[in-house]
Each structure stands twice: as C-alpha cells, then as structure tokens.
Amino acid sequence: MMAAGHAAKGGAAVTLLERNERLGKKLAITGKGRGNLTNTADLEDFITQFPGHGRFLYSALYRFTNDDVRRFFHDLDVPTVEERGGRVFPQSQKAFDLVDALRRFLDQTGVRVIYGQRATAIGVKDGIVEYVECGEKQFPADAVIIATGGASYPATGSTGDGYRLARELGHTVETPHPALVPLETEETWVWDLTGLSLKNVSVQLTVGSKTVADEFGEMLFTHYGLSGPIILTVSREAVKALKKGKKPVVHLNLKPALTTEQLDARLLRDFEKYSRKQFKNSLGELLPQRLIEPVIRLSGIDGELPVNQISREQRRQLLQTLTDMPLTISGVRSLREAIVTAGGVSRKEIDPASMASKLVKGLYFAGEVIDIDGNTGGYNLQAAFSTGTLAGLSAIGQE
Ligand SMILES: Cc1cc2nc3c(=O)[nH]c(=O)nc-3n(C[C@H](O)[C@H](O)[C@H](O)COP(=O)(O)OP(=O)(O)OC[C@H]3O[C@@H](n4cnc5c(N)ncnc54)[C@H](O)[C@@H]3O)c2cc1C
C-alpha cells in the first residue's frame, strides 16, 4: 500500500493486486489490534533492532523515517501517541485506522486496487519485467513490486507466495523460519497458568552456561508454554539454539526491580506480618494468586508450615525460586504462529538504496518478503513502510 501510493503520487499509473477481498488484514491485527506502527528510537537504534542485518535497511529508514511515518498518518487524520519503550500507536488505539488511512491514501493518489487477484507468476522478457500473471489474466507492467509479506499468520493472506515468485525469477530465498515466536516448555505445570500475564519481570535465556538474551517487561503463560513481548524477543536466540540441537532455558525473575537484599527484607516483613499463618497463606501480597502454588512447590518448602517456623535456609530457597525460575524450552510454535518470518528473498540480490532486484530489471521488493526481521516494538511495520516507500519511489525513478 505504501509502495503503490507513493508511486502513484509521483505520477505513475499503479495497479495494486490484492488476493484478499480487503486490504491490510495483517495490519489490522497488529499490536493486539492497537497497531504498534513504529518506534521513536533513533536510526542507529533501529538498525540494532534487526540483529545482524539492520544495515540493509539504512537507506530505506533514512528515506522514510519514523517521524515521516507519524506525519504521514497524522496528515491522514490518524494522530499517534508514544507509549512505553518508544512504541508508537494510533491515538485511537485502533490498528484498523491505519488500514483505513492507507486505503484513503490509495484513493487520493489514484491507485487502482483489484481485489481477489492472486499473483501467480511474473513475466520477464530479456531480463526485464513485462507483466504480472494472476491465473488466466495478465497485467502488463513496466515495474513490479513484490510486497506479499512473509509466511506467518497465513490466514491474513501471507502464505509465502512472494518466495516462489522470486525464486522463479532466479532469486535466492533464505529458508523461512519463525523469528518472533512463542516458546514451548518442558514443564507442564506452566500450561495450567494459561492466560496469566506478568508485568515488570525479567527473563534471561541461557544455552549451556552462556546467557544469550536478557529482557525486561511483560510476558504471558499459555497452554503450551510462554509468550508475550519479552518472550518473543528472546525467541530469536531460542530458535538458533534449538536448531543446533541445544536446549535453551528461560530463567524467570519475578522481582527484578529488587536486589536480593531488598527482596529478602521484603520477605522478612511479610513473614513477620503473617507469622501465625501457614506459608501458603503468606505470599498473597508478593505474587499473583495463581503463581503461589507453583512457587511454593518449586521452593521445596511445605505449604502447611507455619510461617514462624521457616528457616533462613528455606527463605534462601524461596528467594532463589522467585528470582531464577528455570523453564526448559522444548520447542517453538510453528511459523504459522510467528509474528514475523525470518528468512526470505536474499538481501544480497536486492539493492538497499532502491529495493531493486539485482537480477531482473523493473523488479522491486518491499516488506517482510525480504530476508529481514526485527524485534517487537514497531520495528517491523516501520521496515515495511520504509522499504515500501523506497520501492515505490524507485520504481518510478524518484528515489
Ligand atoms: C499478530 C501479529 C501482530 C503484529 N504486530 C506488530 C506490531 O504491533 N508492530 C509491528 O511493527 N509489526 C507487527 N507485526 C508484524 C507486521 O505485521 C509485519 O511485519 C508486516 O505486516 C509486514 O508487512 P508486509 O506488507 O510486508 O506484509 P503483509 O502485511 O503480510 O501484507 C502482504 C499482503 O500481500 C497479499 N498477498 C500475498 N500473496 C499475494 C499474492 N500472491 N497475490 C496478491 N496478493 C498477495 C496479502 O494478502 C497481504 O495483504 C505483527 C504480526 C502479526 C502476525
């Protein structure tokens, strides 16, 4: 949508082929329906949010910055607000407003949108694009932009078609795999906590004796293990470890804001207050109700024990459980459930200054179909908006 609108604004006759009966099905469900469209991080920070490959996005992010994105939507009557961690959302808190704004942008710029048209092939003659084929139909074109998304959440339309289209034109496609994806745990008791969300906790992901990721924020228990923003962020490293046949471990710290001494003092205060109660009835102020039973079990302390009989050693065990709860990761959810697909059309075969194919003249790429994947926080949508804009302008020679 960004690519088509910008190309049309520059004076080109543009046709957007959308396989669905409506536009932006995925965009409409982003950020839990609130649409975390970008981040206020500066350009250098942005680059680091695409681990190991952010430099590829430099020109695109420079050409159409996070401020540009906010201004763009503001001008289309969708003002935005910044929230924790620099995350930017529509003021209305509705991702759908982003879709609606983009649709108006396409209207204003005169893009012809054709629904229910699934691109099946791209015709090339003498190394130059000639048409897009949708089954029986052919749409002649001087330039073609592949912006078909990745292969996650296929019900939204992104079933990985772009990978096939690119491969058929000689492009290398790095094997698609889940990037931001929920984790499955070996510990089955976790599954009973389905729906419990924890704020202000931290997780460390270890592989063997090495800590490979460390995040602070919000997470969620699910019927198979763990999800939520900080889990999705560390999942990238979990995927890597699992691929090497290793078992990563999430160490959950339920009280990262307190030092061990502060937490111990807090426990002592609570224990004094509840000294005549049983241990299981003394943690209500410290933990969410549903976490009390598992924490007691993991601490190894008898829940029936009167609080005033808890020894120093037992308190130490409890401290350990509260600050380092190990959860063994047995696998990740499938690509279908991933927020973003890693892998895709090889960056080596795309000119980062224009998003043009280095192999086929008149061919461009934008968005998640490219081998790019960022962390949560609005980075992926910004990358899609920026590469889309750059591809649209390049396709009409205005980059
Ligand atoms: C649940 C969820 C929440 C997310 N939340 C956020 C968030 O808050 N912030 C953020 O930055 N990122 C978020 N993301 C990631 C972000 O949505 C994607 O990275 C982004 O949408 C990619 O944009 P795209 O245009 O490349 O692809 P898509 O948005 O997938 O769009 C591709 C379009 O191409 C169409 N298409 C596919 N194949 C064909 C074909 N053969 N012919 C014609 N049309 C075709 C599809 O129908 C679709 O409309 C989220 C993803 C998910 C799944």
Image (spheres, rainbow, N blue to C red):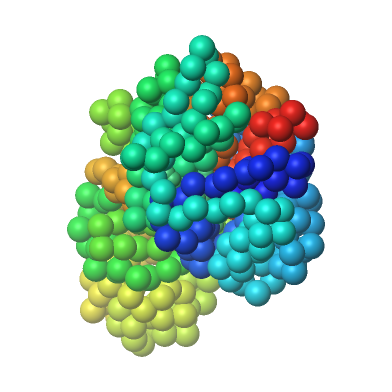
Q: Which residue is drawn at 78% across and 51% down?
A: 67
**From this viewpoint, which residue is outermost toward the bottom?**
276
Image check: 244 left or right of 141? left
Name the one closer to the observer, 213 or 268.
213
| In the image: residue 71, left or right of residue 386 | right
**Residue 282, percent across and down?**
38, 80
Establish if 385 lies above or below 60. below
Q: Relative to residue 48, is residue 113 depicted above or below?
A: below
In which quadrant of the rendered view does residue 237 lie? top left
Query: Which of these two is toward me, 260 or 67?
Result: 67
Identify the residue at horizontal 74%, vertical 28% (top origin): 397
Which x, y percent locates residue 281? 34, 83
- Where is residue 133? Give x, y as percent: 41, 35
Q: The C terminus appears in which quarter of the rendering?
A: top right
For residue 163, above or below residue 169: below
Quadrant hosting residue 224: bottom left
Q: In this view, does 250 lie to the left or right of 245?
A: right
**Which residue, as the protein is rendered here, is positioned at the far top?**
126
Q: Is residue 65 above or below residue 221?
A: above
Residue 364 in the image: x percent, y percent? 58, 29
Kindly tell me whether residue 125 is visible in this rendering.
Answer: yes
Q: Residue placed at 61% from the left, 61% from the top?
A: 103
The number of callouts visible is 0
- Residue under the point 34% across and 39% down: 136
Q: Nearer the viewer, residue 371 or 303?
A: 371
Q: Is residue 341 visible?
A: no
